[in-house]
Image (cartoon, grey):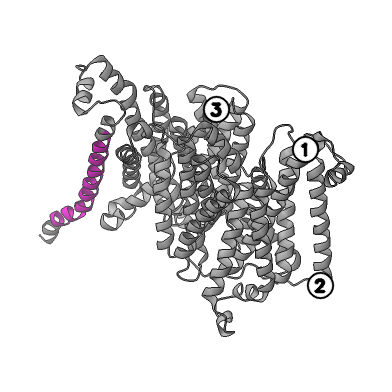
Amino acid sequence: MTVTATAPATRPQAARPRKGAAAVTAALALLVAALAVVDITQGTAAVGPAEVFRAMTGRADPADASVVIASRLPRMTAGLLVGAVLGVAGAVLQAVSRNVLASPDTLAVNAGSYLALGMVGATGVSLPLFASSGVAFAGGLLAAGVVLALSGLGTGTVRLVLAGTALALGLNSVTEGLLLLFPEQTEGLYQWNQGSIGQNGFDGVLQMLPLALIGVVGLLLTARRVDALALGDDAARGLGVPVRATRVTVVVLAALLSAAAVTLAGPIGFVGLCAPALVRPLARLFPAFARARATWPAAGLAGAGLVLGSDVLLRALVPADTAVAVPTGVVTSLVGAVFLVVMALRLKDTAESGAPDRLRTPSRTVFLVTTAVLVAVVVGVTVAGVLLGDTGLLLGDVVNWAQGRAGRAVSFVLDTRVPRVLAALCAGAALALAGTLVQAVTRNPLAEPGVLGVSGGAALGAVLLVTTAPVAGTWAVAGAAFAGAATASFVVFGLAARGGYQQNRLVLVGVGVAAATTALISLLIVLTDPFNATKALTWLSGSTYGRTMADVLPVALVLALGLGLAVARRTELDLVSLDGDTPRLLGLRLSRVRLGFLVVSVLLSATAVASAGTIGFVGLVAPHAARALVGRRHVRVVPVAVLLGAALVCTADLLGRTVIAPAQLGAGLMTAVIGTPYFLYLLVRSRR
């Protein structure tokens, strides 16, 4: 009697969580359906709900029916498909990597697909949509494999985000170089890279739908194995789950879903990151959502809601004529950047940052020899930069030019080339010094103005002025860059200051701010005049093209100020880089000292960006290499890092001007190609 009395009572109790999960999933589906209806009614043409209903029932005017069938419905359907597959892909990648920040964005899947399609486009080959998806799939899968191999599984959020961000920056730099070298073959690829769900008919949706179904069905078949992986590798093996094969299969299927989304609408940023995070808290209320077969469909619905909601919000806030030109991916990237910052503030694995490096201290002779060699290298690179280019010169030509006795042709070449070389030297030195100061103050060996969003803020301020006031002068651009860098640094360092600039929080907030500035820059470029857009893209590639002595003056002045301060306050730099207690015991006002050094680093980054565009990784590579060569004392690190930064950027600028002359590549693209492998090497070394 006892058994028969209690069994019926336990079944409803066990069924309640399942019913609750089903109710939540149904509510998400209703929300997505409502957003889909609203999305259909938005656009430049005056087609409301009544006209849409008549068009779908075959009773509308031909003009209204054409708008609805050829544009509105395909756009809405593409938004549903793209959002759903990205949401599922993000949830799957997070589950298999045991990392809440894994997604197609942070694993550089989108960047890999972008580069693969850019390489095909540069050859002039025109591929059908289905073949393009195969190219995107191969590029995205390769990038994801590299990031996962470098970051490891379940080893922390920061390593994965840093590996993905660094690889994405390097891959995007190569792609941007292709866009500048082959503008006709890659026309429209930049706009495509911003992500837009606008469609011209259902052809694209119908071709990508089978790929999406294959990926989703394949993932659902592996759901039980993925649930077992959540228990740990050893437990999964004890249950008979092939761990390695399961991970490889799941990552391949997730990359297939991402490739389908990228091929159809371009990279729609951060949907794969945000959608699973919105669903994850539901597992606390409804245990059924702890299982993959319940979580993944909910994440797909959340992703569809994010994409359609972003499209609806954009068209509700922006005039219809303007909204047509704004890619949906820009809106989702802004939302995702804010989400990433919030996640960074809530993550618990934010251990205290240690000193940048604890290396041996070489002898004074080593320091003097290293400095002398670097001075010789800088002089040699400078001379080569002045003499080499699309027109070769001799030292005698330079001497005659300096004395005012050169011919018109030689004078013209040197009048344009010398400022470029000086701009590269000063910008490289300034970025290296800025990275040295930031790493010392934050005691974070991975801190760098580009990674932390400071350079992105400077670029945003400068691009805003370049696109709205193309005739703005040098000092105006420098001022705008400083305003943008100051705003970005205020956000990054202000949010990360709580708890003493902990490594995880600082880096993740910086990456989020950098993503937001990139999205806003893309928005400005897409909306501006095509001439201004080309000018902005060239400038963003880190080009010194067209620089004059007036452009060099601001960064030279700030560099002199920064060097003087760093040398005069070298002891304070050594103290703040040690720990948080020693400076206070010695009577040092830590907060004031930190603020002063950070302000100088912002000035250095802003003027460097204003004079030479965005140049990444110099602020990371130069200080690391300097400490490896001469130890940790800043009286030695500062001059060596400055010389290394100047030599690196000047060499990159020289290679960009000469390797494929008369065509040119920006110094920023070259430093990204050099800096990305070094940055990834640092991650591997720190992992060991």
**Left or right: residue 681 compared with residue 195:** right
Q: Which mark is first along the chain, 3 or 1? A: 3
Q: CA distance from mark 2 to mark 3?
A: 55 Å
Magenta-colored span:
7-36
Tell me residue 218's x, y (percent). Answer: 41, 37
The residue at the point 75 percent across, 37 percent down is: 659
The residue at the point 56 percent across, 69 percent down is: 596
**Left or right: residue 556 compared with residue 113:** right
Q: Nearer the viewer, residue 355 or 498?
A: 498
Q: CA distance from mark 1 to mark 2?
A: 42 Å
For mark 3, give the secondary structure. Answer: loop
* Up-down relation of residue 309 to residue 118 (above or below): below
How many residues crowd mark 2 within 10 Å: few (<14), some (14–19), many (20+)?
few
Quarter of the image holding residue 326?
Answer: top left
For mark 2, give the secondary structure. Answer: helix
Q: CA distance from mark 1 to mark 3?
A: 31 Å
Return the residue at label 2.
364
Q: Tell whether position 212 is magenta.
A: no
Tell me residue 237's x, y (percent). Answer: 47, 53
Q: Which mark is first along the chain, 3 or 2? A: 3
Quarter of the image holding residue 543?
Answer: top right
Q: Which amino acid type is shown beneath numbered disc 3?
A: Glu
Please say if the residues under marks 1 and 3 sit with CB atoms less than 8 Å apart. Answer: no
Return the residue at label 1.
413
Tell me residue 79's x, y (percent). Answer: 35, 34
Q: Tell whether position 19 is magenta.
A: yes
Answer whether residue 251 is visible to the viewer in this image.
yes
Residue 187 image label: 3
**Left or right: residue 233 compared with residue 29:** right
Looking at the rendered image, the quarter that the N terminus falls into is bottom left
Foreground label between 1 and 2: 1
Answer whether residue 349 is visible to the viewer in this image.
no
